[in-house]
Amino acid sequence: MKEKTALEKLRILLPHWIEHSHSHQHEFKKWAETARNEGKEDVATCIEKALSALSEADKALEVGIASLGGKIDDGHGHHHHHH
């Protein structure tokens, strides 16, 4: 089997990073709501700012994927990290 080039690896890694980011975004939304329900509007706002930054990072990574010609399947399926 041929070794993957660095660019082929990036075409696998970038979508994985976006998927990983999405799982964190779900958690951020949940905890921002929790903070707000506990009367910590300032904390909720901080979490929401971080959520917005993650969303912008995802957009930048998507541009990178497009520049590389789109994502490729690594043959390993998807896996999730739970924190």
Image (cartoon, helix red, strand yellow):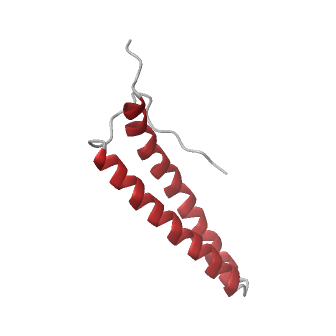
Residue 32 lies left or right of residue 70; in this view the side is right
Q: Position of residue 79 (x, y in %)?
A: 51, 39
- Snapshot quadrant of residue 27: bottom right
- Snapshot quadrant of residue 33: bottom right
- Residue at (52, 63) in percent of width and height: 54
Q: Position of residue 25 (x, y in %)?
A: 54, 63
Question: Viewer-proximal residue, 6 or 42?
Answer: 6
- Vertical side of 47 occupied by 14: above or below: above
Tally of marks: 0
Residue 82 lies left or right of residue 64; in this view the side is right
- Residue at (29, 47) in percent of width and height: 67
- Vertical side of 47 occupied by 22: above or below: above
Question: Viewer-proximal residue, 66 or 44?
Answer: 66
- Vertical side of 16 occupied by 63: above or below: below
Task: Identify the residue at the far top of this view.
Answer: 1
Q: Position of residue 14 (x, y in %)?
A: 43, 45
- Residue at (41, 18) in percent of width and height: 3
Q: Position of residue 4 (x, y in %)?
A: 40, 23
The quadrant the N terminus occupies is: top left
Residue 6 lies left or right of residue 53; in this view the side is left
